[in-house]
């Protein structure tokens, strides 16, 4: 990929000069500035693990609380210092930098957690944070304009307005705010990208139904999807992978408004906009992969992106490649009561599996790992561990290590099989090729007794008993393909 500066030059610059001075030495038109506005999900509340602490880009800078340009790192915002974490802003900036290697990207964090849209007006005071959200943002925008050109705004807000009364006037207030900021920066066509509120709270859909009208009401605006994004356990704030993915979607929306073609050169940073995924809306089915970018609904267990290697996503199939280079993948979203269906095809002697209710568990060493019950997939006909029915509790369709399937019909390697998992409350059923082969109760006495006799007894409590969790497809280094992956939520 073309870069304006070499890595060694950046090392020299940032090692010898303040980044703010460096940015201010560039022509203003080469410093593209984006304003990040809204409430807590824009400010970011995701956990800043070591993985996210290393995020950054040599051409992405941020205006800190003191009004100085610094390297952009998580957390970008400072509205509530004890709570600020991973938000969408940094990955947005990184994707915009990848899209244009000839500029510096400046981010202006302005979000304030807990603020309804009424607080985003001149003179409005937020007592909880002792801030004037709009007035403070205006000061920071003017400061940023000394260094570069304001190129756009990304906006995520509305949780504080998710009630019928506030939602009824939300679009009007947002239109006014957009017009006010455009006047402030002297650009009546300044691109504005708004993000949908999360899908996991019904009340948030009041605002989403208003946001969908924005592009028709206000020129040069776009709305990006929150599909598949999930919370960090509090039912409100996006977790770190979801916040990062949202940033990429904001970038996609901004690039579309700026009429910037998305080339293969930066497609990995800016995925195509999510396409509709309901395969049969009348029955509540949603497709988890239909040949669009797998990043929309899947990510690696080791990061917030679909693996760059080890997995092949094409023709409506997800295929794990031999070699164990890709790691397991899991849904961005978590599910509680659900029916999952998919088709799978194994290669000779292959071993893989489908895990569900995948959630953080603490082991005896005090480490937190992701795990959950597994619908085992293995070549019963050739794999040495299960051939001749020597280990039914680890054969295809079993609840791995715990319960063996019964009366199953399994097609051989190289042929497609159909798997179904139905989870409703504590009751779980495994189906294979149209037949129910296993039924058990999560958290029952017999379930816990069997867990206690396996390697899963290393967890302090709760193996397989999470209220909700991710769906996970394993990479055991053997080739296996999955297609027609769909899910529906049960009441």
Image (spheres, rainbow, N blue to C red):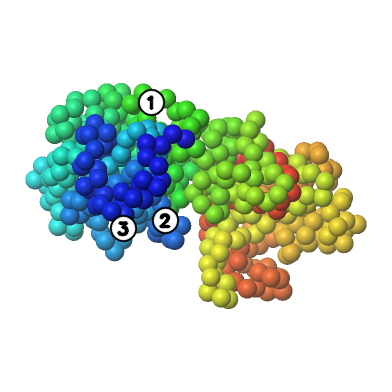
Residue 342 at x, y percent in the picture: 67, 41
Secondary element at image label 2? loop
Residue at x 56%, y 39% (from the top left corner): 294
Spatial CA span between label 3 and label 2: 16 Å
| Front residue (pair 124, 81) | 81
Residue ID for mark 1 = 260
Left or right of 138? Residue 410 is right
User: Disc 2 marks which residue?
Assistant: 54
Residue beneath the point at 62% across and 48% down = 326
- The mark nearer the N terminus, 1 or 3, is 3
Q: Is residue 242 above or below residue 364?
A: above
Q: Earlier in the sequence, mark 3 or mark 2?
A: 2
Residue at (27%, 33%) from the top-left corner? 30
The answer for how far apart the CA atoms under marks 2 and 1 are is 28 Å
Q: Which percent across, then down, holds residue 3?
A: 41, 37
Residue 170 visible: no
Q: Label 3, on which residue? A: 84
**Tag nearer the camera, 1 or 3:** 1
Q: Reading the chain from its start, which is encountered first: label 2 or label 1? A: 2
Tag 2 and tag 1, C-beta contact below 8 Å: no
């Amino acid at each position: 990929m073309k870069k304006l500066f070499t890595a060694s030059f950046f090392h020299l610059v940032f090692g010898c000069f303040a980044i703010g001075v460096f940015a201010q030495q560039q022509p203003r038109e080469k410093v593209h500035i984006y304003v990040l506005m809204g409430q807590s999900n824009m400010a970011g509340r995701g956990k800043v693990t070591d993985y996210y602490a290393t995020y950054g880009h040599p051409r992405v800078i941020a205006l800190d609380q003191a009004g100085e340009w610094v390297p952009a790192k998580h957390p970008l915002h400072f509205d509530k210092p004890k709570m600020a974490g991973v938000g969408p802003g940094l990955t947005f900036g990184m994707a915009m930098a990848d899209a244009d290697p000839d500029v510096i990207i400046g981010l202006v964090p302005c979000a304030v957690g807990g603020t309804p849209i009424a607080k985003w007006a001149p003179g409005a005071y937020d007592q909880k944070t002792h801030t004037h959200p709009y007035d403070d943002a205006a000061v920071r925008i003017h400061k940023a304009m000394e260094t570069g050109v304001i190129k756009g705004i990304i906006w995520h807000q509305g949780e504080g307005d998710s009630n019928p009364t506030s939602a009824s006037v939300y679009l009007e207030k947002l239109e006014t705010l957009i017009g006010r900021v455009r006047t402030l920066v002297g650009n009546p066509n300044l691109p504005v990208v708004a993000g949908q509120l999360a899908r996991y709270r019904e009340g948030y859909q009041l605002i989403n139904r208003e946001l969908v009208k924005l592009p028709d009401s206000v020129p040069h605006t776009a709305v990006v999807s929150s599909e598949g994004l999930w919370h960090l356990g509090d039912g409100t704030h996006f977790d770190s992978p979801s916040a990062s993915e949202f940033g990429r979607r904001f970038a996609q929306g901004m690039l579309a408004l700026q009429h910037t073609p998305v080339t293969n050169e930066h497609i990995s940073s800016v995925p195509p906009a999510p396409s509709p995924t309901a395969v049969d809306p009348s029955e509540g089915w949603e497709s988890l992969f239909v040949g669009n970018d797998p990043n929309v609904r899947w990510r690696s267990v080791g990061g917030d992106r679909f693996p760059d290697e080890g997995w092949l996503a094409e023709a409506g199939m997800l295929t794990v490649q031999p070699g164990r280079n890709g790691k397991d993948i899991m849904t961005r979203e978590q599910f509680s009561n659900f029916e999952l269906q998919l088709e799978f095809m194994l290669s000779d002697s292959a071993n893989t599996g489908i895990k569900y209710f995948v959630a953080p568990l603490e082991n005896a060493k005090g480490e937190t790992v992701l795990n959950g019950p597994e619908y085992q997939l293995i070549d019963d006909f050739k794999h040495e561990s299960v051939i001749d029915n020597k280990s039914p509790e680890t054969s295809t369709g079993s609840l791995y290590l715990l319960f063996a399937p019964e009366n199953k019909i399994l097609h051989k390697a190289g042929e497609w099989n159909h798997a179904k998992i139905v989870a409703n409350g504590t009751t779980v059923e495994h189906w294979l090729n149209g037949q129910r082969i296993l039924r058990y109760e999560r958290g029952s006495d017999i379930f816990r007794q069997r867990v206690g006799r396996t390697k899963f007894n290393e967890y302090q409590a709760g193996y397989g008993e999470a209220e909700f969790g991710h769906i996970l497809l394993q990479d055991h280094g053997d080739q296996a393909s999955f297609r027609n992956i769909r899910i529906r939520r049960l009441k």
